[in-house]
Image (tube, grey):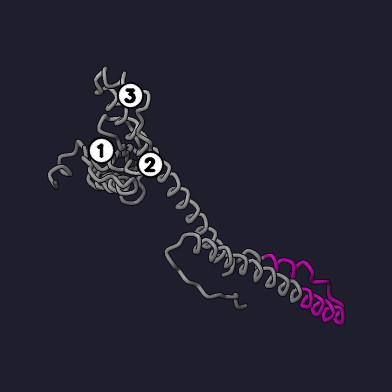
Amino acid sequence: MSVPTSSLDFGSDPDDLQAIASEQRREIMAAKALDSDLDFAFNLQLQEAISASLTLHHQPSPSSTVVSESKMNEDVPHFPDLLSDEILKLEQELKDKALSETEFRKLKNDLHRRIHDHNVALEISRMPEEEWEDWGDNFERPFGEGSSEGVNAEIFRVYFKGLVEKQFPEGTLLGGIGVAVCDSRDEVLFELRKPLVGNGSSRQGAEMRALVEGLNAALELELKRVTFYCDYYTIFKYN
């Protein structure tokens, strides 16, 4: 049975991809429902035909055999089912990506505000007491335009670590990475911890993966000046 198709345009907009995936899943579900109805009608007609044929020869009803064959057909995965599962995975990945982007936007805005507030507090602390008494009540530095200048000037710190440990007696390799993005005062802005799957079989591989995750975090936060910290000389000598 053919599965209905529609024109796909894989643009860069996640909302468009989400809409396309949802539309494809609806079409596949409709196709599965039609396929199920046709299979039921066919099996019913087949059972009636076999029953009529066996009745003429005075043999027992083969209903159990037909039901067994029908159950076997149900256990075999169908292409629409597999395709529907893949589209569900795609939809979930798109949702996770959108959620991650939203969280990074919130984190970036919070970062800009924290740096702005710190700079304002620093400017007030350096203001002479006489000047503060004259116009301190009217002093203000609204957050908004120009707030990113403090972010561009500050040097951030990215700490990263990758670990691999071999468990005995099974000999299973366990790996994980950790990343921390801090401001110039070492206040943590972002943390990431995750297990390594597939390519964490060596210390160097785990450290490189942690470095990549740290770079990705710095790029997502649009940090212009970054210093990376690690305690693994093999990675350090690449600088």
Secondary element at tag 3: helix
Magenta range is 44-71
Q: Earlier in the sequence, mark 1 or mark 2?
A: 2
Between the C-alphas of marks 1 and 2, the distance is 21 Å
Relative to 34, 100 lies left or right: left
> Which label lies toward us, 1 or 3?
3
Q: Main secondary structure of the magenta part?
A: helix
Secondary element at tag 1: strand
Q: Quick check: 65 above or below 126? A: below
Residue 177 at x, y percent in the picture: 32, 41
Label 2 environment density (alpha carbons within 10 Å; few <14, some 14–19, many ≥20): few
- The number of callouts visible is 3
> Which label lies toward us, 2 or 3?
3
The residue sitting at 33% across, 24% down in the picture is 135
Q: Earlier in the sequence, mark 2 or mark 3?
A: 3
Residue of label 2: 144
